[in-house]
Image (cartoon, grey):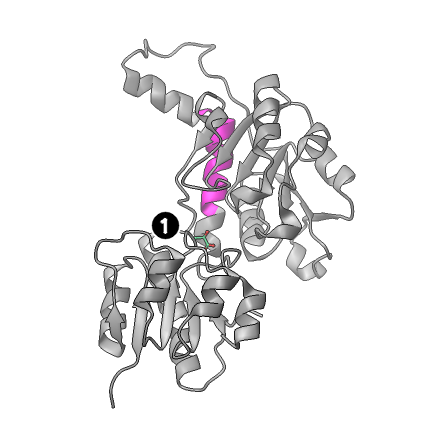
Amino acid sequence: MAKPVLLVTRRLPPAIEARAVRDYQARLNTEDAPRTGADILRLAQGADAVLCCPAERLDGATIGALPPTVKVLGTFSVGYDHIDLAAARTRGLPVVNTPDVLSVATAECAMLLILAAARRAGEGERLVRSGAWSGWAPTQLMGTLVSGRRLGIFGMGRIGRELARMAAAFGMEVHYRDMVRLPPEMENGAIWHEDDDSFLGCSDVLSLNAPGGEATRKWLNAERIAKLPHGAVVANAARGTLVDDAALIDALRSGQIGHAGLDVYDGEPKMHPGYLELENVVLLPHLGSATTETRDAMGNIVLDGIDAVLAGREPANLVR
Ligand code: DGY
């Protein structure tokens, strides 16, 4: 029997491309050039499955126009805010993603942003590389401890909970804001807040770990920023859309936010140009899940889901 046809929109780790080639007539993207919706429609002709990535928008029009042969859409990400899920449901197209396997890596990245921002690692690195570093000095690049400070986690899902575990080991007191309180055995001592005011008021360090999408668009706005303790540290390893960039930049300029660490941007790879002018923000290029082990695990779980749908089984990683 002929192998099913799988369109893969970006370069994937070697082990994952090898699996795709072994099990599918795989249409790989050897140049790794980002695909537009029009490209995907053209390349998906006759395909049984499409495996896309978060930088590609699968809007309603694209999903509606996918060839009828396409029976499943996989995304090489846990986030699916780039996919019009309502359109996929209407079209009867199951969507599978990569939950769980990237939680530790993304939480590590959030911790990296927190530490790098609080300890001014970006400024320090730039100083060393510029050749202008004149040696140790008692008042040089003084940052702030994270140990003993209060960490507010906005979005206590899998990644938020991993971050809470790591932060506790750094001696941080963990607070969280989510729609519902976790069962006590999952809280591990973290303190739930039912409203933004009490949550923000005790977030010396605020980490955004909620999903993107309309419900969280520009959640961190000027009004909420004003409720944070003066000089708070902000980290975002979730989605750029959670932040009102102009408001965050104003607050970084005024000192209301002391330091920020960002891995994600609204409209990335573009970003608000104001960030590039600021010393007190550390900017990473969406590295959250970028470890070899994690990316392999992501590839395997998304292919497991695609395999399951094409074999008529319910995938464990179906997006509902
Ligand atoms: C995701 O999985 O949603 C990340 O943003 C990419 O690792």
Bounds of the magenta segment: 108-120
Judging by the rendered image, the residue that carries numbered circle 1 is 290
Amino acid type at mark 1:
Ala
Q: Which of 284 and 181 is in front in this view?
A: 284
Q: Nearer the viewer, residue 223 or 103?
A: 223
185 above or below 5? above
216 above or below 112? below
Residue 201 in sight in this render: yes
**Magenta-colored stretch includes residue 109:** yes
**Magenta-colored stretch includes residue 276:** no
Q: In this view, does 286 lie to the left or right of 94?
A: left
Percent x, y of residue 12: 29, 59
Q: Nearer the viewer, residue 283 or 181?
A: 283
SS at mark 1 in the image? loop
Q: Residue at 25% x, 68% y: name it.
A: 27
Q: Is residue 215 left or right of residue 306?
A: right
Q: Is mark 1 within 8 Å of ligand 1?
A: yes
Percent x, y of residue 303: 37, 71
213 above or below 254? below
Q: Residue at 52% x, 47% y: name it.
A: 238
Image quadrant where one finds the N terminus:
bottom left
Number of residue marks: 1
10 Å neighbourhood of mark 1: few (<14), some, or many (≥20)? some
State the image quarter where residue 23 is shown.
bottom left
Percent x, y of residue 95: 49, 70
Magenta highlight: main SS: helix
- Residue closest to the far bottom: 1
Q: Which of 86 and 16 is in front in this view?
A: 86
222 above or below 143? below
Percent x, y of residue 136: 37, 12
Q: Residue at 45% x, 38% y: name it.
A: 112
Image quadrant where one finds the C terminus:
bottom right
